[in-house]
Image (cartoon, rainbow, N blue to C red):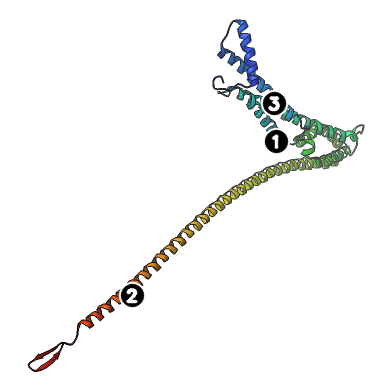
Amino acid sequence: MIQGKEINGFSFGILCKEYTEGVKRGVVSIETTFESMKKSVNATAIANAMKLFSETIQAVTLPQLSSVVQNRYNIARENAMKEFQGKVCSDKDNSYFNKLVAKLDEEFCMFVSRNNEQSLNKCRQFLEDQCKVMEGEDFHVRGGFNRLCQLIKTVEVNYRKLTEAEMGPKLGEAWKRFNDELEEKKSDILKFDNAMNEEDKKQAELKAQNDRKERENLLQREKLEEQAKQQRDMAAQYERNLESQKQTLEHQQTMHVDQLNAQFSQNKAAQEAMIGELRSQQDESNRRRDEDRRAHTEQMNQMSNKISAMQQPVVRRRRGVCCVM
């Protein structure tokens, strides 16, 4: 051990290497060698932990739900921490630990960014495939705006069938970007359509307004649904925590009741034994009292008999009277 740190085979090998190089340089100090070895070992520990982290987190196919990404990150982080803690040497001030945490957080941010980017690309590719029906079609004709809106509505219906589990977390944002990109084209066609028919213009504007409101309402509903889902998840987690606490409390109460029952049984048995002993003592006392009474009665009878025997008739003659005493 050096500075209270146990040296394993890997660290000892590096220590020997650093010490040998110090001898070659003419600087021989076990403490200096240990510091050099510590830096090398901890740098290797961080590198190995980061390698394991990258292998674990990149095993998932992107894009994925944000929750899946977070779960994968938690697993990868735990594995990396175990790897690091098994190799780190004398990190009393947690400096190397903090470096590892910073690297893990940076890598996670990059992983989230890649997931979002791939989600956007996948959604954009789907929309581009859906919009191929619009290619080569001239919308600068009477009713062209309505025709374009119908096609966009068809694309939207198909797009709304997708889920974040398939397309990733940017499903809603990708649609918003796509719709914003179409606004300029829709505006141009709408102007052309309006120039051809004022009445059509009013209807088109109303339709566009309704579409915008519908999209806004839809986005708002999706936002509210997501918030409601988060609240439900939090409530479910809260209920699970309460149930766990309840079960723990019930288990503790059951153990306490069992202990009380055991103590009661022991006390009851002791009381019954004491009562039995007291009864035996009472019976013995009663027996002795009865024997004493019988002995006393017998003694009294004997004394009475003796007194009777002693009191024989005494005849005195007094003045010619015979007295019997």
* Of the pair 104 and 271, the residue shown nearer to us: 271
First in sequence, mark 1 or 2: give its number: 1
Q: Secondary structure at mark 3?
A: helix
Q: Are marks 1 and 3 in contact (CB under 8 Å)?
A: no
- Whether residue 295 appears in this view of the structure is yes
Residue 216 spot, x, y in % from top left: 74, 40
Mark number displayed over residue 71: 1
Residue with the most extreme left position:
319
Residue 146, relative to residue 112: is it above or below? below
Residue 168, relative to residue 31: is it above or below? below
Q: Are marks 3 and 2 in contact (CB under 8 Å)?
A: no
Identified by mark 1, the residue type is: Asn
Spatial CA span between label 1 and label 2 = 94 Å
Which residue appears at 60% of the width and 14% of the height?
Answer: 36
Identified by mark 3, the residue type is: Glu
Q: Secondary structure at mark 2?
A: helix
Q: Are marks 1 and 2 in contact (CB under 8 Å)?
A: no
Identified by mark 2, the residue type is: Arg
Residue 220 spot, x, y in % from top left: 72, 42
Residue 315 in the figure: left or right of residue 250: left
First in sequence, mark 1 or 3: give its number: 1
Which residue is under mark 3? 107
Which quadrant would residue 131 be assigned to in this image? top right
- Neighbor class of circle 1 (other Cα within 10 Å; few <14, some 14-19, many 20+) is few
Residue 285 in the figure: left or right of residue 161: left
Where is the C terminus found, in terms of image quarters? bottom left
* Of the pair 298 and 110, the residue shown nearer to us: 298
Dot in front, 3 or 2: 2
